[in-house]
Each structure stands twice: as structure tokens, then as C-alpha cells.
Image: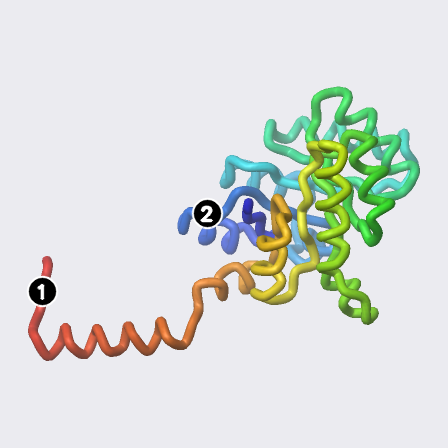
Amino acid sequence: MKFFVDTADVDAIRELNEFGLLDGVTTNPSLIKKAGRNILEVTKEICDIVEGPVSAEVTATDADEMIAEGRKLAKIAGNIAVKVPLTLDGLKACKVLTGEGNMVNVTLCFSANQALLAAKAGATFISPFIGRLDDIAMDGLDLIAEIRQIYDNYGYETQILAASIRTVNHVKDCAMIGADVMTAPPAVIKSLANHPLTDKGLDAFLADIKDAGIKIL
């Protein structure tokens, strides 16, 4: 499974990238707003940090305007994935932009039918929002499983990018179902390494090392 981080915080992106844990980055207008920076400027900086895909979202809702914005975003760097909403206009923009050789991430997916349309439009990534479905008493993981089955049935190459991930269990479950990618906030990614028994074992090792006076360097 590929790990993308969902943030526009360049310091957090740089830290995770240095750990060797990042395959890409997803951003959106809300994250850009939180970062308080110009969208083109911060996106370029992120693209310089990571080698993998960096999703940058259009702000328009009309297909022609989305296409124009997507082309501008794609010029920022070769690893840009233009992010468009899962609307009919968004799908039209996806078809055009992917036809021109650009990566496209179709976002705000909440049903298997929507994901099927995105695959037919040639999307590079489909982003089902599992956490938001959980918020309305639906099971977001069921959606991941449905999309996985449909894509496997027909050999669609669109990658399932599990989004709106809230917990480490979301990550594990998406990996078990077969999502190609997950994107999560920095804190969730870092917490994947945590386990109380790891902490307990390390404390015991450190105590023994101190008592034995063991040194390597």
C-alpha cells in the first residue's frame, strides 16, 4: 500500500519524507487555507520535497474552467496529480486531462457507482471518503470493498486512494481490503508505529543496557 499524507504543512511533509514513509501528498483548498499560503507557491514547494504524486485541487466547478486550471496546476511540476470533484463536469475534465497525459485524482467519492464512472473517465486515482461515511452511520470500509471488487472485475487501472482516514484501524482495514493508496493526516501516519508493548519492551532493553554498561560506539 502506498502512503500519502493529507496536509499542506511542508514541515510535516519534510519530516515524514525523511523517515522514508511517504509515497505522495494530497492537498485540498481547506488544507491550503489552513497553511495560509499561496496555492501555487506551497504546491511547488511540496513537489520539490517528494518524488511521488502531489494532488492539487482545482477551484472551479465548470468543466472548461477545471480543465484550464488543471493545465496550469500540471505545469507546476511533473509529479502533480490534478484533483477534480466527482461531478459530471469533473468527470469531463478528468477525461480531457488524462487524455493529455496528466495524472488525475477524482475526489469526494461516496458510492461505488461514482467510482465506476471515474474509472471509465480514466482517473489515475479515485478518492472514497471513508471517515465522512462513518460520520453519517454508514460503513466507509464497505465502499472500499465494493470499489475493489468492481475494479478487479473489469481490470480498471484506477488506483483506490482511501481518504478521510481518521484512525490507525482505518489504515489496517483498507490495507486488508486491498486499497492501493491511503492518505491520512501526519499524526495518524506517525501513530501507526505506536504500541504499548513496544514501549514496554524498549524500556526493559534500555534498563538492561544501562545496568550492563553496554556500549557500541
Q: Given this view, does label 2 or label 1 mark the residue nearer the observer?
A: 1
Which residue, as the protein is rendered here, is positioned at the far front? 153
Measured as percent of width and height from the top left, residue 127 is found at: 73, 47
Callout 1: SS? loop
Please, what is the three-letter code of the amino acid marked with disc 1? Lys
Residue 212 relative to residue 135: left or right:
left
- Residue 103 occupies which quadrant of the picture? top right
Colouring scheme applied when the structure was drawn: rainbow
Residue for badge 1: 215
Residue 17, numbered circle:
2
Please, what is the three-letter code of the amino acid marked with disc 2? Asn
Mark 1 Cα shell of 10 Å, populated few (<14), some (14-19), many (≥20): few
Mark 2 vs mark 1: which is more N-terminal? 2
Q: At 10% from the left edge and 58% from the top edge, which residue is drawn?
A: 217
Residue 211 relative to residue 153: left or right:
left
Callout 2: SS? helix
Measured as percent of width and height from the top left, residue 18 is found at: 41, 48
Q: At 92% from the left edge and 38% from the top edge, which residue is drawn?
A: 88
